Structure formats: C-alpha cells, structure tokens
Image (spheres, rainbow, N blue to C red):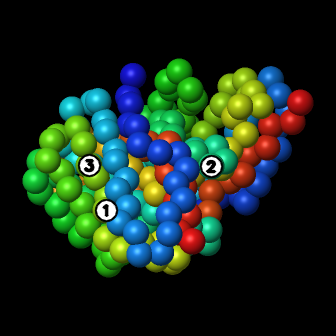
Amino acid sequence: DVKVTQSSRYLVKRTGEKVFLECVQDMDHENMFWYRQDPGLGLRLIYFSYDVKMKEKGDIPEGYSVSREKKERFSLILESASTNQTSMYLCASSSFSGVSTDTQYFGPGTRLTVL
Amino acid sequence: DAKTTQPTSMDCAEGRAANLPCNHSTISGNEYVYWYRQIHSQGPQYIIHGLKNNETNEMASLIITEDRKSSTLILPHATLRDTAVYYCIVRLFSGGYQKVTFGTGTKLQVIP
C-alpha cells in the first residue's frame, strides 16, 4: 500500500524560528513535492525534487528551502518562520513514468501555525 | 491543463451510490482525468484516473463519455466516511514534473 508520511500533523512555532518539515515515502518514488494549501488559494507548489540531491523551485519558493539527501526523504525548511507561512503543508510523491501521466500520492499534511 | 467544472455540493444517502459529475469540455486527446478527494484537515487521497475507457478499482468507478467532454465518479455504496471534497482534474504529464492543481471541487455530504 502506498505510504507517504509527514513528521507532524500539527506544529506551532514562533516568528523567526527555523522550522523543519519532514516527509518520507516508502514507494521508491523518484519525484517528491511540497505544496501548501490555503483557503481560497488551492494547492500551490513550493519545491519539488526528481532525484536525490536535485531540487527545482515551484511557484512560491520564497522563504523556503528543501533538502533531499536520500531518495525516500524530502525535507522542507522555513529558514525564518513568518506569520504568513501559517498554512497546511502537503508532501506528495510520484514515480517517474516518462510516458504520459504520473499519479501523485499525498501525505496527511502538517498544519503549521506561526505565532 | 484543461479546466474542469463540478457542482459545488451534493448530498447522498448512506448506502446509496454517489454519482459525482465533472465537465471537461476542452480536454485534449492525451490528457487524463484524475479524481482525488480530501477529507477535512487531511491530505488529498488519490481515487482513480482514466484516459478513454471506464475504470474501476476498489474505491470507485470512473465513467468517461465517448467524446471525453465529461466524466462521472461513482462511489457504489456511500458511507459516512466518504464525506469529503472531491476534485476532478485533467492532467498531461509531458516529462519532467507536473504539479497537481485543484479547482474548488464538489463537497459531498453523506447523510445517515
């Protein structure tokens, strides 16, 4: 069974703190993604990675960085958390198909509140 | 990706089939129809996808019209746990990566 796990379901941090969100998948997927989901704005892609140590910016990378040292793990880092980064953070993974479509599987989400 | 149109909300009686429609009139020939759902405060869950033929898995059935301009997701025996927002999206993977973009979806309420 497909499994994407995230380190925390709920997290509360203070402005200026460095925040680490971790995501692990057990499906040997090449691609991993970090999204944030906000009411009225839908899903927005922050970063993605298509291989170990490879990363690409998504639509809203500002204020975030990522790390992928192992194939199964993709970390999202908020260098200095701000209140506008309060959101639901979703990790997803997919297998590189190289053909016509890929199915992304999502984790349970981390609801981050920055005070 | 082609745009999709779904009803904002629907009710379904527990135990009955839930039929969720989706219009995607501008779909191109090599775009897939995907369905996800999101239960409140949880991550989106993949349900099913298809290109031309009808598809069935352990969760649902997907019926795609012959002209591919619309589709219907069928949950054969809805339970209270099926209460969620259901997203129909159209995707083409052209190599590299492709983000998932959700519209507003259909809020399905399963009623006891």
Q: Which residue is mark 2?
A: B41
Residue A74 is marked as 3
**Callout 1: SS:** strand
Q: Where residue A21 appears, x then y in whole percent?
A: 37, 53
Q: Which residue is mark 1?
A: A77
Position of residue B79 relative to residue A94, above or below, is: above
Q: Are marks 2 and 1 on the same chain?
A: no
**Callout 2: SS:** loop
Which amino acid type is marked by label 3? Answer: Phe
Give whichever of B105, A56 is nearer the camera: A56
Regarding residue B111, the answer to whether it shows in the image is yes
Q: Which chain is indicated by disc 3?
A: A
Mark 2 to mark 1: distance in Å? 22 Å
The crowd level at tag 3 (other Cα within 10 Å; few <14, some 14-19, many 20+) is many
Mark 1 to mark 3: distance in Å? 10 Å
Q: Where residue A4 appears, x then y in whole percent?
A: 38, 37
Residue B25 is marked as none
Q: Is residue B110 left or right of residue B112?
A: left
Which amino acid type is marked by label 2? Answer: Ser
Q: Quadrant of the C terminus of chain B?
A: top right
